[in-house]
Amino acid sequence: MNWVVLVAAALALVSAVTVVRARIPVHSVLALVLNLISLAALFIALDAEFMGLVQVIVYAGAVMVMFLFVVSLLGARREAIEREMSLLPGQEGLGALAALLLLAALLLAVLRQAYPAPAALFAGFGTVRAFGAALFYEHVLVLQFAALLLMVAVVGVVVLIARRDQGR
């Protein structure tokens, strides 16, 4: 196996755990940026260069800037976060057990699956033109829904900030 794939996969796993374990929201967002960049490296190593570039530009770029903006505006206090995180005793053990059970179920499902021979792909498969046609013709409703969802998130942050400023 290629060493780039191994390093990127290990980095993706470590940064994903850091996203969940970080106590400071900005650190969590920065770990998520590292996770998305390592996933882009995996895409590029698997010969999906366009998907790797989209991963970096759209997710690690635009969406993470929006996340940092939201975290900065909300200004979560460390004490409030630690209070919320310590509500359930033994929650880390339960989370680890649930993760192991999910991993076992996934491995069992993958190992029991009989995989057919790969089908032949059409000539334009994987090109930017085919991707654009699928995105803007076949899945335009999903694209519009995603844009609407992002807009609702931004409006929600503005409303939360306006309420917080009125309370002062």
Image (tube, helix red, strand yellow):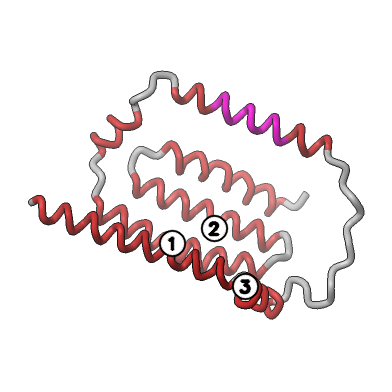
Residue that appears at 51% across and 69% down: 57
Residue that appears at 47% across and 51% down: 32
Q: Is residue 144 above or below residue 152?
A: below
> Is label 1 in a helix, a strand or a loop?
helix
Tag shown at residue 37: 2
Report the amino acid beneath label 2: Ile
12 relative position to 18: left or right: right
Q: Mark 2 vs mark 1: which is more N-terminal?
A: 2
Q: Position of residue 30 (x, y in %)?
A: 42, 52
Residue that appears at 10% across and 50% down: 167
Mark 3–mark 1 Cα distance, whole angstroms, equals 17 Å
Work out which residue is located at the far top of the displayed protein and give it: 89
Report the amino acid beneath label 3: Leu
Q: Is residue 44 above or below residue 160?
A: below
Q: Which residue is mark 1?
A: 149
Tag shown at residue 44: none
How packed mark 2 is, by other alpha carbons closer than 10 Å (few <14, some 14-19, many 20 or more), is many
Confirm whether the magenta stretch covers residue 78.
Answer: no
Mark 2–mark 3 Cα distance, whole angstroms, equals 23 Å
The residue range painted magenta reads: 96-106
Residue in front for this viewpoint, 166 or 86: 166
Q: Which residue is mark 3?
A: 135
> Is label 3 in a helix, a strand or a loop?
helix
14 relative position to 51: left or right: left
Could you tell me if the residues under marks 3 and 1 are in contact, i.e. CB atoms within 8 Å?
Answer: no
> Is label 2 in a helix, a strand or a loop?
helix
Work out which residue is located at the far left of the displayed protein and give it: 168
Mark 2–mark 1 Cα distance, whole angstroms, equals 23 Å
Could you tell me if the residues under marks 2 and 1 are in contact, i.e. CB atoms within 8 Å?
Answer: no
Most frequent secondary structure within the magenta stretch: helix
Confirm whether the magenta stretch covers residue 100.
Answer: yes
